[in-house]
Image (cartoon, grey):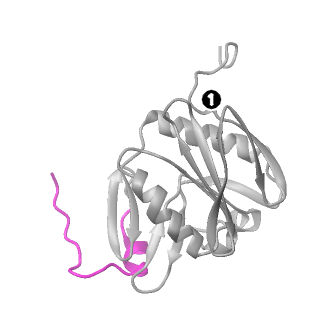
Amino acid sequence: MNLVTWPDRLLTLDDWIALPEDNSHRLELAEGVLVVSPRPVSKHQRAVLRLGAQLETQLPSTLGVLPEVELIVEPGTPPTVRVPDLLVGTDAGIEANLPRWVPGDVCLVVEILSDGTRRTDRVTKFAEYAEVGIEYYWLVDLDEPVSLTAFHLIGEHYENVGEHTDIAALELSGEILTIDLPALTGGRPAGQGD
């Protein structure tokens, strides 16, 4: 086991940006505290890939979907940087090749619940994303049956606008998107990739 030396203070946004790239863990910054968790496992990764693909084909041309990008929730001292499973943001931000996103360029954040992050996703991130004005927040639970709970920001608080299993029709920025939830974790249909 390697021991890493960290500053004896809360990290700044500059400290975060200067961290070496580490693909072996998932890193976030919560009020200046580095949060290290294991990388998501295969079923989780498949769900991220498939949900992203479903979203990408239905979004208006002004929006795009990205997996695991840095979202600066609080740039001040101490900073908070989250890395949601999926983020829907402006196509202009994607074209600009942003290394980090700010809430004003994001309309939807999706978190797929995992062991070790359920409470953070349901409570902490729920409050953080609402506080910074992200209009839509979806929580996906891969336990059978796969489900999606959709929240819409009304005023300063998220309101539950639907709990879905099977095929979900969800409103996003004036568009209706159809999400096939069982397809997030099931095997590929016969004939695909054979």
Q: Nearer the viewer, residue 171 or 45?
A: 171
Identity of the residue drawn at 59% across and 38% down:
147
Residue visible at 20% across and 80% down? 8
Q: Position of residue 139 (x, y in %)?
A: 56, 50
Q: Which residue is mark 1?
A: 182
Residue 4 in magenta stretch = yes
Residue 191 screen position, x and y as percent: 70, 13
How far from the left and from the top, in percent, is residue 141? Answer: 52, 41
Mark 1 secondary-structure assignment: helix
Q: Residue furthest bottom?
A: 77
The residue that appears at 61% across and 48% down in the rendered structure is 149
In the image, taking residue 170 as reference, residue 13 lies left or right, namely left
The total of numbered circles placed on residues is: 1
**Can residue 30 be seen from the camera position used here?**
yes
The stretch in magenta equals 1-21
**Which residue is more in the foreground, 124 or 81?**
124
Is-magenta flag for residue 65? no
Disc 1 marks a residue whose amino acid type is Pro
SS majority, magenta: loop
